Amino acid sequence: MNKKKIFNDPVYGFVTIPTELLFDLIEHPYFQRLRRIKQLGLTDFVYPGALHTRFHHALGAMHLMALALRTLKDKGVKITAAEGEAALAAILLHDIGHGPLSHALETAIFQDVPHEQLSLYLMQRLNAQFGGRLALAIRIFQGEYERPFFHQLVSSQLDMDRLDYLNRDSFYTGVTEGQIGGDRLIKMLTVDPASERLALEEKAILSIESFLVSRRLMYWQVYLHKAVTSAEQMIIRLVSRARDLARAGRAVPANAALHFFLAKPITIDDFAQDENILQRFVQLDDFDIWSAVKCWATHDDLVLSYLSRSILDRHLLKIVLSPTPFDADFQLGIQELIADKFQLPPEEAALLCIAGRLSNNAYDAAKGETIDVLTKSGHILNVAEASDLPNIQALSKRVDKFYICYPKELREE
């Protein structure tokens, strides 16, 4: 069987699968599940074209990884066939642990269970199934391999993950500000010979700035769009309500896999200790959530049914933004209006008033994950130090906005 297949990707054109191992990973049910998880969750409520999946994104990131490795090889960086395949496998599987609706339900279904940890558990299980052939990929994914630039290509402030999702999300939403010139950035990649850390050539500084500006704009216009925020908070709140009802002994219809996670708290330690929980997890996808929401639209719990009907009909909660937090008295006043309008007790009325914070930080060098520039004189500098442009300094500052969501029926009266 010929396993060196070609995918026709709308963003990059033809994407090749370079090895049989990578093809077998793509064919595995764990990876095929990503076809049923949208990359941008509920963003299609605002941008109707944003229907692409984690499957699309993983293949695109693998393609960019292949281009990056070829660039580094052409510049004299020694990369063995085993290292190259491992890096491609690591980026291909980096999102395999995502749950339904991508990031939206990480806190509603689970309890402190990051998708990165679930990706690692699934990679370890795949490694056992493939006779240890993913051992190096796992070391790269975890940042334990002695050549750190491989991990940086998978996870850093300028990795193949970010380059793909900004390009891809820009393409499918139609928000052209997200187009980042990824080809040039990849062509400018290099490796510091002394530390074997990833860097970019000095002439890439303007491209790095453009990348960071695009990232900042995409967060405000797409990922943190106010209507997207309202929709995501609604789905989080309604699944949380279904979870609380189920754990209180109320009947909440859902398929077996979803009901398992609704019925009792599951922590990351539970995943580590019981492989059956991981097997239940890989049965979950977006379709499980939507089929349950359709059932919950007629539930006798008013909060659950109201939120379910509203999200199905795109009757989103009104959202108001502010540069400062909303004070407690203001929130209490809204909750009292909700209680009066819907004839709800105060504790249930509070569930239809959602407040929170949006944070946008395009470049965070404080955590030690800098974008480094290799100067012509051979020195490594943080791009914020290497650039004489004020924009990169400004993009390093976090910008916060505060929001409050409540039913539109209050405004209409």
Image: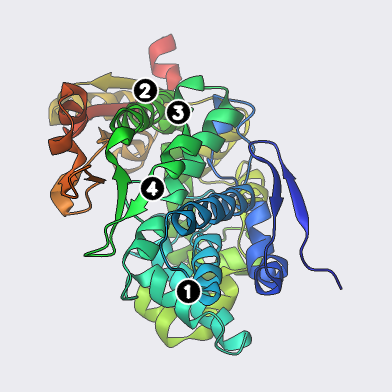
Q: CA distance from mark 4 to mark 1?
A: 21 Å
Residue 3 position (above or below residue 164): below
Q: Nearer the viewer, mark 2 or mark 3?
A: 3
Give the Cα separation between the discs numbered 4 and 2.
42 Å
Q: Nearer the viewer, residue 21 or 411?
A: 21
The quadrant of the picture occupied by the C terminus is: top left
Q: In the displayed structure, would residue 374 be above or below residue 131?
A: above
Q: Could you tell me residue 331's position as x and y percent?
A: 22, 28
The three-letter amino acid code for the residue at tag 3 is Val
Q: Nearer the viewer, mark 4 or mark 1?
A: 4
Q: Please tell me which of labels 2 and 1 falls first in the chain.
A: 1
Q: How many marks?
A: 4
Q: Which residue in the structure is indicated by mark 1?
A: 137
- Say if residue 310 shows up in the picture: no
In the rendered image of this protein, does residue 266 appear above or below residue 368? Answer: below
Q: CA distance from mark 2 to mark 3?
A: 16 Å
Mark number displayed over residue 319: 2
Mark closer to the observer (4, 3): 4
**Measured from the top left, where is residue 142 in percent x and y?**
36, 71
Q: Secondary structure at mark 3?
A: helix
46 and 20: which is toward the camera: 20
Residue in the picture at 87% in, 73% down: 1
Q: Identify which amino acid the numbered label 4 is placed on.
A: Leu
Q: Nearer the viewer, residue 389 or 323?
A: 389
Pair 4/2: label in front: 4
Where on the picture, by quarter, is residue 213? top left
User: What amino acid type is highlighted by mark number 2?
Assistant: Ile
Task: Count neighbours of disc 3 (C-alpha within 10 A) and say few if under 14, some if 14 to 19, many if 20 or more.
Answer: many
Q: How is the image coloured?
A: rainbow
Q: Circle 3 is placed at which residue position?
A: 222
